[in-house]
Image (cartoon, rainbow, N blue to C red):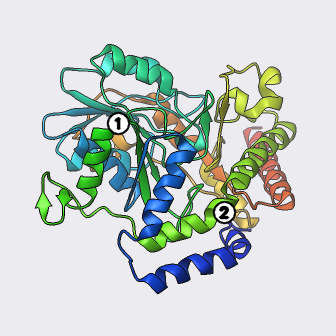
Amino acid sequence: MQFIDLKTQQAAIKANLERRIHDVLSHGQYIMGAEVAELEKTLADYVSARHCISVASGTEALLIALMAFGVGPGDEVITAPFTFVATAEVIVLLGAKPVFVDVEPATANINAASIASKISSRTKAIIPVSLYGQVADIDEINAVAATHGNIPVIEDGAQSFGATYRGRKSCGLSTFGATSFFPSKPLGCYGDGGALFTNDDALATAAREIRTHGQSKRYVHTRIGVGGRMDTLQCAILLAKWPRFEWEVAERERIGHRYGTLLAEAIPSFRPLEPADLQAPLASARGLKVLSDRTSVHAQYTILVPHRAEVQQRLNAAGIPTAVHYPVPLNEQPAYRDLCNDDPTPVSAWLAQHVISLPMGPDLSEADQNTVVAGLQNVLSAMSVEKTAAAR
């Protein structure tokens, strides 16, 4: 069993993939070829954004967005500590300070209600992370930003492209939306890639210039920039994948629901790490808060377990791969401890000790899913019996 199955997907799109790659090899425009503009239009239409700017990676997307706002030394950017390091990395690279706001225990997304208290005169942007494929409470965050001088909001949608929030697509919900096309993402290329989305013409122009070394036209550098273009070949690969993407999003949602139902039946203590409406069959039974009109693309299927290291070891021995996203909050990482605010983030610290991600993807078979659930049930049951016996 694989944690993420990319081979099945590749086999399903092989003919289209080979045709798209052959087209690029034939015309030879490996940088900013026609496929770049085609992909950008396709993705912009999907998100319902006026502009899509393809970039070299999800990290570059965040970096370029912050550069477009002029973030620099002395500025502060509010974000969550429970995420991949790139979210804070780009802030520090520009000389700014990350200000961490703790996350919600039910979703692992930034707690929108806690953001206002961290806003200062130096706050230049807010970066909520839409973790595990589910969108953060963007409307509430946008409202807080608006009441404090229209602070720009950049959704880090590296894991949530394809998800919806109150009827709108992730990455089209705020000032800027940023996503990643790393191979394991819901829409992944065969290398690095990413994109920015915005409805602001001036910001789109800035982002396009920044990604090409700050050029407004060839050899005319109107602003400081980076080498942040997405390769034509990677755009072609995403275009080959695109006809299957809607089906994959639907399958991820179906498989996520099925995980929730199976796990609830097998493990009495099971709790999904997401809003209750994403686990519709469990909502009334669990008495969890229901948030309206939201879907997850399930970039990962992540749950909470006790004694995670032992659970993970036993599952691995049974042939069931797992992963941990993420074992150490960013404000506890050695490189960031002395660069951020000192406020504790206890929810992030607790989640980091208990989260575990199970195999997930649109091509995960029901048989493999059954094996995962049964394996987890057996491991937790055996551990409970052993610990009860040891306590006697």
Q: CA distance from mark 2 to mark 1?
A: 38 Å
Residue 392 located left or right of residue 342: right
Disc 1: which residue: 200
> Measured along the vertical axis of the image, is residue 150 above or below residue 134?
above
Q: Is residue 310 left or right of residue 236?
A: right
Q: Disc 2 on helix, strand or loop? A: loop
Q: Residue at x 65, y 74 (%)?
A: 16
**Category of crowding for the residue at label 1, using alpha-carbon neighbours closer than 10 angstroms: few (below 14), some (14–19), many (at least 20):** few
Which residue occupies 61% across, 81% down?
18
Among all residues in the image, which is located at the extreme top? 147
Q: Residue at x 70, y 35 (%)?
A: 272
Amino acid type at circle 1 is Asp
Q: Which mark is residue 213?
A: none
Q: Which mark is residue 3?
A: 2
Answer whether residue 160 is visible to the viewer in this image: no
Closest to the observer: 12 or 312? 12
